[in-house]
Amino acid sequence: MTHASATGAYPAARPRRNRFDAFTRRMVAEHALSVDNLIWPIFVCDGTNTRSPVGSMPGIDRVSVDLLDEHLARAVELGIPAVAIFPITPLDIRDASGSEATNPGNLICRATRRIKEIHPGLGIIGDVALDPYTDHGHDGLLRDGYVVNDETIEVLVAQSLNQARAGVDIIAPSDMMDGRIGAIRAALDAEGFVNTRIMSYAAKYASAFYGPFRDALGSGGLLGGDKKTYQMDPANSDEALREVALDLAEGADMVMVKPGMPYLDIIRRVRDRFAVPTFAYQVSGEYAMLAAAFERGWLARERTILESLLAFRRAGCNGVLTYFAVEAAALLRRG
Ligand SMILES: NCC(=O)CCC(=O)O
Ligand SMILES: [Mg+2]
C-alpha cells in the first residue's frame, strides 16, 4: 500500500506507522502479560464438600480443604505460579486476640499441607494479619479501641512461624504494623526458615475497595469503624516510598501495593525508586466493579480483563494478585 503526500505538508514522523499491522505492533510492544505474572487468591472454608459463592464476587467461591484438589487443578494445569490463601474462620472460633491465627490446625495450615501433598510445585502465599480471626474484625490487638502495634507484632511473629512450619513458602504480612517485617524475618531465621520469603504488603491503603473481600470472610459486619490508624491514607504517595524503604531495610524480599488499579501511580513510583520485585493486589472491589459491568454487558469481558492486568505490568509490576488469574491464564494460552 502506498500513501503519497504530494505537498510534504504532513509529518515525516508518524507514530501510527508502528501500529500499521499486527506483526509490527507485536515487535514494538513494550510490555507483556504472561501466566507467570498471575497469583490467584483463594478463599478456604471449614467443613467438607463445601463450596459457597461470594455474593458480591460473581464467579468466586469459598471451598473446603477437601475440594482444593479439584479447585486448583485448572490453575496448576495452566501454570499459575502461586496461590494466596485466605481463611473463612467460623464466627464461634473468632476471639478478641485472634488466637486461631496461631493454631497449627487452622485453615491456612490445613490448606497448605493439603496443597503441598497434591501440588508440591505450586507456591503458597500465607496472609499474616489478625482480621480473619478477630471478633472485632481488626488486623491487630485492640486496647481502648486502638490497634496496638508492638503487642500485635508478637502475635504476627507467632502466626508467621505457624504458617512456615505448615509449609507456607511466602509469608505475606498485610497488617501494616510498624516494624513487623524485621521481627518476622528474625524469628523465621532463628528457626531455620532462612529461605521462607516475605512479600510485604508495604503500601496498603485504607480503601473502600475491600468491601466484597470482607463479605467473603464474614468480617464486614464485625468491623466497627475503619482501619485508618494503620492502613495508609489514599491522599498519600511519598509516604508509600517511606513504607517500602522500611520494609526492604527490614528484610522484605518482595513488596506489594494495594489496592491495584486506582494506585498504579504508586506502583510506578515504587518500581522507579527501588527496582525490587513489586506486586499489586487487584482487590475484591476492583473485581466486583468489572464483574458487575460484564454482567450488564457494559464492558467486554475478555479484553477488559487482559487490559486491566497488562496495565499493572506497564506500571512496573512483576505480578498481580487477581481473582481473574485462572480465567486470564486460560485467555493467554488461547492467545
Ligand atoms: N489482606 C487481604 C485483603 O484485605 C484482600 C482485599 C481484597 O481483595 O479486597
Ligand atoms: Mg510499614
Image: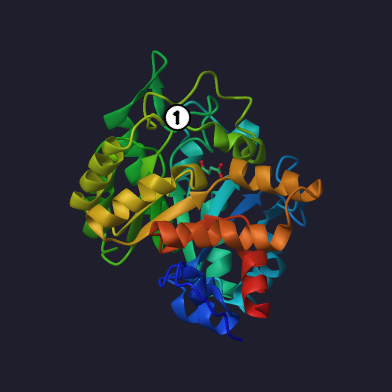
- Give the residue at x 48% y 29%: 138
Q: As displayed, is residue 65 above or below residue 180?
A: below
Percent of width and height locating residue 206: 45, 31
Q: As displayed, is residue 69 above or below residue 282?
A: below
Front-most of residues 198 and 88:
198
Front-most of residues 253 and 143:
253
Percent of width and height locating residue 294: 75, 51
Q: Quadrant of residue 303?
A: bottom right
Give the residue at the far top of this rendering.
144
Determine whether, in the image, residue 158 is placed left or right of residue 212.
Answer: left
Tell me the element at label 1. loop
Q: Is residue 273 visible?
A: yes
Front-most of residues 266 and 84:
266
Q: Is residue 252 visible?
A: no
- Give the residue at x 40% y 27%: 141
Amino acid carrying label 1: it is Ser
Q: As displayed, is residue 87 above or below residue 121?
A: above
To which residue does mark 1 refer? 97
Quarter of the rendering occupied by the C terminus: bottom right
Give the residue at the far left of this rendering.
249
Ligand 2 quarter of the rendering: top left
Quarter of the rendering occupied by the N terminus: bottom right
Percent of width and height locating residue 135: 55, 27
Q: Quadrant of residue 305?
A: bottom right
Give the residue at the far right of this rendering.
296
Q: As displayed, is residue 163 above or below residue 233?
A: below
- Give the residue at x 48% y 47%: 260
